[in-house]
Amino acid sequence: MKAVNYQDSGGGRCSGCATCTGSNGFTARLMRRTDGKAVIYLYHLNKVNPPCGDNYDTVVDGKTLYFEKGQWYKISQRVKVNSGVNKDGEVEMWINDQHAQIRLYSGALVDKLSRIQFVTNGDKVDALYFSTFHGGSTADWAPLVDSYIWFDDIVISTRLADVVEGSVTSNMQSNTSNDKLSISPVPVKQNEIVNLPGVMENSIVEWIDMKGNVVESCELHKEGIVIAPSINKGIYLLRYIRQNEVVVKRILVE
């Protein structure tokens, strides 16, 4: 994988290895580079990585962040566009509500990128230019295998609390490395055994498609085990009872 990205942008959305002039906009995106390395990727007036954008590693708990397959991440980005022709723009990032550090080209770690001059014409953030792709514009950038990524709960706000401090949340529970009751395997194949730790025998597990329709309802054969039904490939929600709590989790059927 070379790159996967999405971005906040403004004005003419300077991108694509173009020269940012101050009047043709800007872009501030998150890239997933080789092996899943997370970088902030900026097009701004004084970028130092011509002809394309500037890359800044994202660091969490002192370690460069590498996105892992099969994990859900809550990603929050704050972009402050510079005032007038001043170099007072800022970018900062949160991963799973934890403030991330950013590694400069010098190797120094900072809590946020600052002294950025995005524009000179007064453009502001006026778009979420949502595109997911493997980077580049030629066939050699294309993925070698079918690849999937899912997005949910997209929030745009001028209030930090709306996207970082928990006032907007999802009722869906993700499979994280510290969830001792995670389903497995992920993804799952049709007619394969699925482990649902903590789910009692004779419990009912519902398979729900992305339109909200229950496409299959299965009973556990024994505690914590269900057989994936013969349903179309795609992403589904599993709804079941675990320790007197209704749980909904996403799962990919291959």
Image (spheres, helix red, strand yellow):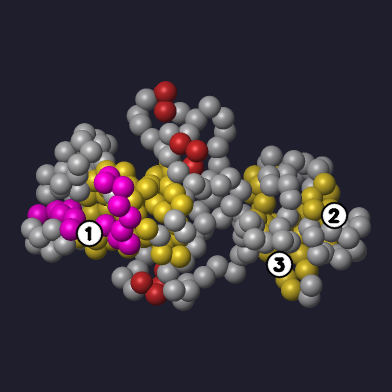
Residue 119, horizontal then vertical, whole percent: 14, 53
Please state the extent of the stretch shown in magenta in the rendering: 105-122
Residue 28, horizontal then vertical, whole percent: 29, 51
At a point 51% along the width and 48% down the height, the residue shown is 67
User: Are dots 1 and 2 in contact, CB under 8 Å?
Assistant: no
Report crowding for label 2: few under 14, some 14 to 19, many 20 or more residues within 10 A (C-alpha): many
User: Horizontally, is 120 left or right of 111 in the view?
Assistant: left
Q: Say what secondary structure mark 1 lies in.
A: strand
Name the amino acid, label 3. Val
Whether 167 is drawn above or below 201: the answer is below
Residue 146, horizontal then vertical, whole percent: 57, 33
Residue 2 shows in the view? yes
For disc 1, the marked residue is 114
Report crowding for label 1: few under 14, some 14 to 19, many 20 or more residues within 10 A (C-alpha): some
Residue 176, horizontal then vertical, whole percent: 62, 58
Nearest to N terminus: mark 1 or mark 2: 1
User: Are dots 3 and 1 in contact, CB under 8 Å?
Assistant: no
Q: Along the line of sight, which residue is nearer the eye, 89 or 235?
A: 89
As measured in the structure, the alpha-carbon distance from the residue carrying label 3 to the one carrying label 1 is 42 Å
As measured in the structure, the alpha-carbon distance from the residue carrying label 1 to the one carrying label 2 is 51 Å
